[in-house]
Structure formats: C-alpha cells, structure tokens
Amino acid sequence: MGNKTKKEEEYSSLKSFIKFCSDPIAQELRDAEDISKEKQERPDIVLRKGDCVFGIEHISIPLLKIENGSADRIKNAHMTRTFNKYRIDDGVDRLSGKEDVALKEIEKIVNDHEASLSAFSCRDYINSLIELLSNHNAKSYRQNISCDYPKDKIQILFLLDVAYPDEFSKELEYRKRESSKWDIFVRNDYPFTYSFINALSTKQYVDAFCLIWHPTDNYSIKKTKCYVLRHGTDMIKSIRTIVWEEFRLPLKHRLPKNVKLKLERNDNE
C-alpha cells in the first residue's frame, strides 16, 4: 500500500484489525506485548500476553492482477515513478516538452487498471489465495516460536489482508450454490464463497484466520470489515453472513475499455 515498507504494511494491517474487530481475539492482541525481533520474519509479528504467544503472519491477497503481480502494487509503483520522472521542484522543470509522453504513460496506468478489472475472475482469485497459503508453513512458524518460548502456549494467526478498489464497494454480482442466477447487491462486507472457506479449512497448523477487508490504500472506519475464522470450527456459521458460490464484477466493469486522455494547453502561459 502506497510507499510503505513491507514491515510498515504488516503493522498497519494488524493495528487496523485490532482496532475494528469485535472478536475476543482482537482484545487479546490489543492487550499483548510486541516481542518481535528487530528483523522479525516467519512469522512476521510476535505478540505475547501472559503465557500465550501469538505468531502473526501477514498475507496480502490481491484481488486484481497485472500479469502475475498485484495490480495495486504495480499501479502505485508506476504512479510514483511517473510522478518523480516529471515533477517540477527545486527550480528544475522535468515536464516541459515532454507533456505528451507523460500523458501516454498516465494513460497506460489507467488502462492497465481497467484491464485488470475486466480480467477479474473469482476462480483466479481463489487460486491466488491457495498458492499464497501453500507458500506459508504454519508448522515451521510454530516451531520457530517454540525455540524461544518452549513453555508458553503458542497460537499461529494468519492475517489475510484484502484491499479492494473502489469498483468493488459499489456493487457486485453473486451466484448462489446450485443456481445459474446472478443477483446484484451493494455490500460492504467481504464476499465469502465456499471455495474461499474450503481453502482455509484445508490449511493445517493455523489456529485462526484474521481477515481484514478494506479500501485500497486506507482503512476507512466505515468501509473496513474484520472477521475471525477459527480452524476446527464451523467457519460458515462463525462469519454470520451469506456464503456464495462465486462473485464477479458487473458487466460494465468486465468490458475492456481504452481510456484516452486529452492534454489541455494554456496558450497564455
């Protein structure tokens, strides 16, 4: 998100989850002491309360992709690079004479975003989740912590961070299990599917999955939703919301667009 470092993103996500989540586990984390090592890795963050140590692994799950990367991260990187390339400061004009080239670069950023929206697939999203989960070994994270705290109870939490673009907050289409009909709803909650829950339930050695669903680049109090899904329990009942077979963006976002920007010149300058 933005220009934050990976570690800053991890802590921002965790702090927002603790702040907005009403589940008792959030209270436990709120009162816990941060005992992470200076360059804590695997798990990303370690907290302790009493004789319980929480190992928290932050996993960012991209909704949209550009090629094989997160569309949000790539877009932010390109925006920053373009801004720095043409900015005017310290008396240096990097833009003059290059306005048309800069406009083309901005067009590409916009069109890449539109293309990622058009290409969105719930199945691809779930496949990304499954691949990400396979890259994280909760058993080894538990072992890493137990080496330092052999007498303490250890809980491994996966903090699943899903940042959604503005288009996802306006409306989505949902399909129920064993139905071919799609319904449109304007919702702020995370679009749970059976395939999502199944992917979590098959991941071993994780005590709980902490999900934070929020707008891209911010944690708006009105638009951020948090959930806790405990392993070994009925996850569908625990989330207390509708579970769908799949979801998708409405047709207007699934049709490819080609945005053209126009440069307006002020001849008086």
Image (cartoon, rainbow, N blue to C red):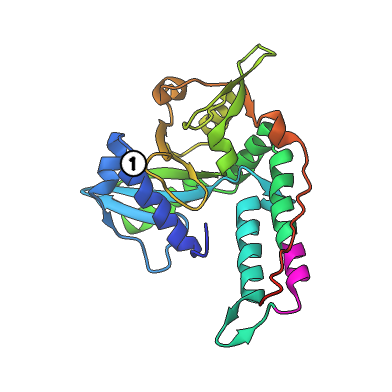
Question: Is 46 placed above or below 235 here?
Answer: below
Query: Can I make out residue 68 in this image?
Result: no
Numbered circles on residues, count? 1
User: What's the amino acid at mark 1?
Assistant: Phe
The image position of residue 225, as x and y in percent, is: 42, 37
Q: Quadrant of residue 11?
A: bottom left
Q: Residue at x 68, y 32 (%)?
A: 123
Up/down of 173 relative to 11, above or below: above
Judging depth in this view, the residue of 57 and 180 nearest the camera is: 180
Residue 73 picture location, percent across and down: 61, 57
Q: Main secondary structure of the magenta part?
A: helix
57 left or right, relative to 35: right
Is 82 within the magenta? Answer: no
Q: Residues within 10 Å of mark 1 (few under 14, many from 20)?
A: some
User: What residue appears at the point 73 percent right and 52 percent down from the top-left corner?
Assistant: 112
For the view shown, which residue lies furthest in the left direction?
50
Q: Is residue 29 above or below residue 187?
A: below
Please state which of residues 176 and 252 is positioned toward the viewer in this rendering. 252
Instruction: Indicate yes or no whether the magenta region holds residue 101.
Output: yes
Q: Is residue 39 left or right of residue 195?
A: left
Residue 74 versus residue 130 in the image, above or below? below
Q: Which residues are magenta?
A: 96-105
Residue 136 percent coordinates (x, y):
55, 48
Q: What residue sits right under mark 1 in the picture?
A: 20
Residue lying at the far front in this picture: please name it.
268
Specify whether 260 is left or right of 55. Answer: right
Identify the residue at image location x=37%, y=65%: 37
